[in-house]
Image (spheres, rainbow, N blue to C red):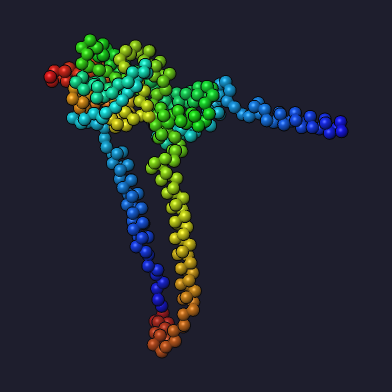
Amino acid sequence: MRRLAVVFVLSLLLAACVSSPAAVPTVQGTPSADEVNAVAKNLYCPVCANVPLDVCGTAACAQWRGQIAELLAEGYSEQQVYDYFAAQYGQSVLALPPARGLNWLVYVIPPLGIVLAGFLLGRNLARWKQSAAGAADLPTVDDDYARSLEEELKARR
Amino acid sequence: MTEDKRPVSILGRVLAWGLLLALLALVAVQLRSSLQGILTRGEQAPAFTLTTFDGQTIRSEELLGKVVVLNIWASWCAPCIEEAAHLEQAWQHYQERGDVVFLGLAYVDTEKESLAFIEEHNISYLNGPDLGTTIYMAFRARGVPETFVINKYGEIASVKIGPYLSIEEITTVVDRLLELD
């Protein structure tokens, strides 16, 4: 019985350790460069077209990374940082635009195109298969004219 | 041998053509807006609302009857440093008149750096962030620094791409507009 109680208490202690806030990774104090870059890689500065913020070398991007570090240090979540940047500089700074308005097309058209292409390919493959099988079933040509034509062609070679 | 061709339904054709046309229209609209150049002289200046760093709200329609010098800048932009002193001197020159307004628009800049820039260069005219880069896009600007001078009727009177190199470069434009009345 005593052994059971010890196991129970130890289990409770283990559970408390696992579920304690210290076990959850949080950005406290000054965030590391990796933590900043993890957020920055999903942002694009309008000045440097097509260069993600984490690898962009301009002064503007350096300032933005500094801003991300400050926001994370203040306790902003990753999503809150994205929302802040979208409000300040427009949605075009986001690597993944929110699925609203015409932005939906970005998410809908590529998968739709893949499904459509797959469907068309499958249908045409089935047709080709059918026509190939049909061609194999065709009766062989067996008339005098065709035979003499074949012989003449062979003679000319 | 008979050819195995299934007729495509009218609805399918209409849908396919409709989708294609919609996509083409979308591409055309995007292409048109990206090919539009910067605003030019004589064009009506776009309406805008600027909330300054100190919380004032400036609406463009309230500026009619005044000559407006709208300067787009950024703290990370080296040529903007070059022209900062000329713009401030020009503002000091006109400030007492009351019919000339200088506005600074910080583009893609963090507030901390913008305020540091303003302080460092002793800029006293109104400045604010271009939230969402909406004003920059409305004026179809292409970089920084760029300055739009708007006449009393709300029309673009001058576009300066790059930095002003002297105070005279600014006063020549503004004086001409003030003399028009």
Answer with the quarter of the image where residue B33 lies: top left
Q: Position of residue B56 (x, y in %)?
A: 33, 18
Answer above or below: position of B114 versus A139. Answer: above
In the picture, which quadrant includes the C terminus of chain A?
A: bottom left
User: Which is more toward the observer, B30 or B142?
Assistant: B30
Q: Position of residue A154 (x, y in %)?
A: 42, 82
Q: Residue furthest front?
A: A1
Answer with the quarter of the image where residue B139 lies: top left
Residue at image location 47% in from the left, 57% down from the top: A118
Answer above or below: position of B15 versus B132. Answer: below
Answer above or below: position of B116 versus A67. Answer: above
Residue B133, visible in the rendered structure: yes
In the picture, which quadrant includes the N terminus of chain A?
A: top right
Tell me if B160 is positioned left or right of A92 in this view.
Answer: left
Residue B169, visible in the rendered structure: no
Residue at image location 40% in from the left, 82% down from the top: A153
Answer above or below: position of A2 versus B86. Answer: below
Residue at image location 38% in from the left, 42% down from the top: A102
